[in-house]
Amino acid sequence: MKVTPQAPRILLGSASERRRKILRGIGLPFDVMVPDLDEHVYARDPRRTAVENAERKNAWCRARRPDVIVITADTVIDLDGRLVTKPASPEEARAFMRRFSGRAHTVLTAVAFGGDGCEPGVAVEESRVTFRRLDDDVIEEYLGLVDPMDKAGGYDIDQRPDLIIESFSGSRTNVMGLPAERVVEWLCRSGYEVGP
């Protein structure tokens, strides 16, 4: 990615290593700040949960770094209209896997942008993931290989998806936690030139 001289610096407001990996993959130089706030949870409204949390993280970072472009995100899962967030324990991660087994769910990531004089905005990306039928042995194998904590739904499409995922549609990076396509689109409108 090439940055035009007038383009402001980028700040990723997130503790997620996966989001950092995605931005590095775009070729984007950026700083990191971790918002210190409690997330809102609406059990019957996954989209509202993601949007509010992404916006609140963005506002928190902008209040402290008004001189940069801030990118924040919140990723949740919608399973039959019910919110699934990050597991609180390995036991809850196992329970999530059993619920996902043989079924499809929607991964929603709300991405908020703002700062350095730019009007704040938010976009929501959706991807659809279908799980294989999982028995307890496969679940234990997966959780022995992949740390389920700090991941929406307790899984990572970037780590051993062959064990658990049958198919997906939509943005793969969205399932990881940050839709690269949305980020690139927004940055192009903000003075960045993205190479081929």
Image (spheres, helix red, strand yellow):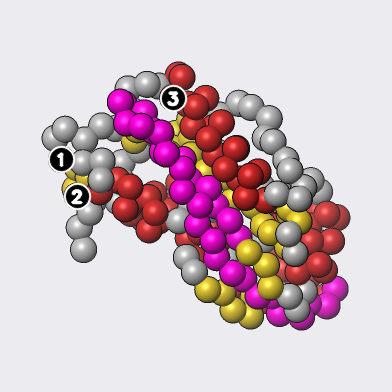
Query: Can you give x and y, in whole percent of width and height, for residue 63 in the image?
Result: 46, 19
Q: Look at the numbered disc 2 and give the secondary structure of its residue.
A: strand
Callout 1–callout 2 Cβ contact below 8 Å: yes
Closest to the camera, between mark 3 and mark 1, is: 3
Judged left or right of residue 100, residue 39 is left
Q: Look at the numbered disc 1 and give the secondary structure of its residue.
A: loop
Q: Which residues are magenta?
A: 107-136
Mark-to-mark CA distance, 1 and 2: 7 Å
What residue type is disc 1 on? Answer: Thr
Mark 1 / mark 2, whichever is N-terminal? 1
Q: Is residue 130 magenta?
A: yes
Query: Can you give x and y, in whole percent of width and height, for residue 156 in the image?
Result: 61, 61
Please tell me how crowded label 2 is: few (under 14), some (14-19), or many (20+) other residues with Cα within 10 Å: some
Please tell me how crowded label 3 is: few (under 14), some (14-19), or many (20+) other residues with Cα within 10 Å: many
Total labels: the figure holds: 3
Residue at which label 2 appears: 193
Residue at which label 3 appears: 62
Judged left or right of residue 178, residue 81 is right
Closer to us: 29 or 59: 59
Query: Can you give x and y, in whole percent of width and height, for residue 41 in the image?
Result: 72, 40
Where residue 41 is drawn, which disc sits there? Answer: none
Judged left or right of residue 110, residue 89 is right
Residue 167 in view (yes/no): yes
What residue type is disc 3 on? Answer: Arg
Residue at which label 1 appears: 4
